[in-house]
Amino acid sequence: ISLRLIADPEYRALARLARLTEGGMIWSAAGRLEGDGDGHCLLRSIDATQLVSLGDLVFTAGGDGGVPQPMLYGRVVEAELRPGAVEWHIRIEPAADLSALRTVHVLRQSINPLRMSAQ
């Protein structure tokens, strides 16, 4: 088994912005999370028309069936809309201190043999 941290420059995954308000969680745009190799991540492909603020949360985008609930990647620490840009430049601080990582839990999907034999 190999382990790739979210800040690794080869890490790629779908991610979704969210903001916690008094009324609950407000989900926003989805983009591509990439490790920057320097302990942070970049969130790419977020259209310039989207609202992005410092402190916004970034979660797994879901839809792959791997985990039933979104998991927290981290928080927006830099959000810049450069002149003429069509996408935001967004830097994410991981929710966990990756340098302090000592243990991991491996999530694997498995096929239920009872479902296979019912077909």
Image: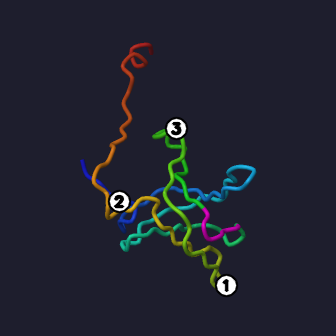
Query: Magenta segment range?
Result: 51-56
The residue carrying mark 1 is: 84
The residue carrying mark 3 is: 68
| Real-space CA distance between mark 3 and mark 1, rounded to the nearest whole angstrom | 39 Å
Q: Nearer the viewer, residue 97 or 112?
A: 97
Q: Mark 1 is on which residue type? A: Gly
Q: Mark 3 is on which residue type? A: Pro
Q: Nearer the viewer, residue 91 or 86?
A: 91
Label placed on residue 4: none
SS label for mark 1: loop
The residue carrying mark 2 is: 5
Where is residue 17 shown, x and y percent of the image? 61, 59
Labels 3, 1: front one: 3
Residue at left 37%, top 68%? Answer: 9
Q: Nearer the viewer, residue 61 or 116?
A: 61
The verdict on residue 64 being magenta is no
Q: Residues within 10 Å of mark 1 (few under 14, many from 20)?
A: few
SS label for mark 3: loop
Labels 1, 2: front one: 2
Residue at left 61%, top 67%? Answer: 46
Q: Is the residue 71 above or below the residue 82 in the image?
A: above
